[in-house]
Image (tube, rainbow, N blue to C red):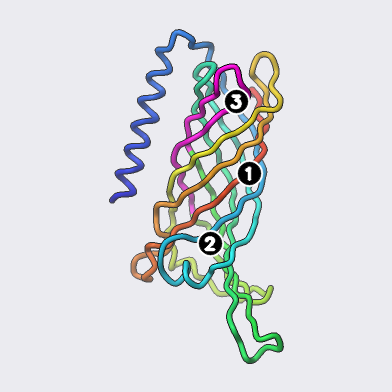
Amino acid sequence: MKEKQFCLIIISILISTVGYTQKEKENSEKIFLLGINAGAHYSYLGGKGIYADLYKYNNYDYVAGINVELKLNRFWSVYANFNYRPRGFYAKVNSPNLENGIVKDEMKFSYIEVPIMLKYRIKNSYLYGVGGIYFAKFLGVKEILNGKDTGDDWSENHNKLDQGVVIGAGFIFYENEKGTTNISLECRYIKGLKGILIQTFGDKDTFMNAYNLQVNFNFTP
């Protein structure tokens, strides 16, 4: 319930801000941009439970997807991504049956992630900030022991939808005169607010968080 209330508050702020920016005297012609993005992220588990306690080691992985941006004026935009994001976490388990005595037990997750954000560009600057909410569709998870897929399917133990908040900043290092094409570098912090495991499994308070660095290429179609 708290997560739903928080998301409603964020959405209300987004709507209010958009309404305000439409009334600004400095409002210019709206520009619609499409684009692509690619980068890397460092994900980690937070909260309580078996996952957070056992899978203490985190992997770097990639993120890639499509950008959609509506410039409301020179400063404000509504900004969204449709990204594919794999996430991996692993544990080191002692095993007397192996020569080195250690088993690497890795859980690899797959998500389609949709952050919906407001973007604010600082006046007379190439710097901007972003903030908003995200929803992520759970695609599946597989367990890998010492580099080999076990074939076990743990998907039924996991919530099919993840959600949380996003905050970040970026730098535009190329933009044409009309503002219809740009290339930027962006860093984000992603905070999960919904437990990744279903309540009946017992670990509903384990969350997924991430630090994200990506390059964006946007253009007017």
Above or below, 177 relative to 36: above
Start and end of the magenta stretch?
116-137
Three-letter amino acid code at the position of disc 2: Gly
Of residue 122 and residue 34, the one placed in the foreground of this image is 122
Name the residue tied to disc 1: 213
Q: Which secondary structure lies at badge 2?
A: strand
* Residue 140, label in figure: 2
Q: Is residue 194 left or right of residue 69?
A: left
Helix, strand or loop for disc 1: strand
Residue at x-position 65% and y-position 28%: 172
- The residue tagged with tag 3: helix, strand or loop? strand
The answer to which of marks 1 and 3 sits earlier in the sequence is 3
Q: Amino acid at mark 1?
A: Leu
- Going 62% across and 91% down the picture, which residue do you hit? 96
Residue at the image point whose x is 49% and y is 28% from the top: 78
What x and y, as percent, mark residue 15? 37, 27
Q: Residue at x 50, y 73 (%)?
A: 54
Q: Earlier in the sequence, mark 3 or mark 2?
A: 3
Give how far apart the Cα atoms at labels 3 and 2 are: 31 Å
Viewer-side label of 1, 3: 1
**Tag 1 near tag 2, CB within 8 Å:** no
Q: Is residue 100 magenta?
A: no
Say which mark, if any, is on residue 180.
none
What is the count of numbered marks? 3
Please report whichever mark, 1 or 2, sits nearer to the chain's N-terminal start: 2
Label 3–label 2 contact, CB within 8 A: no
Which residue bears the numbered disc 3? 33
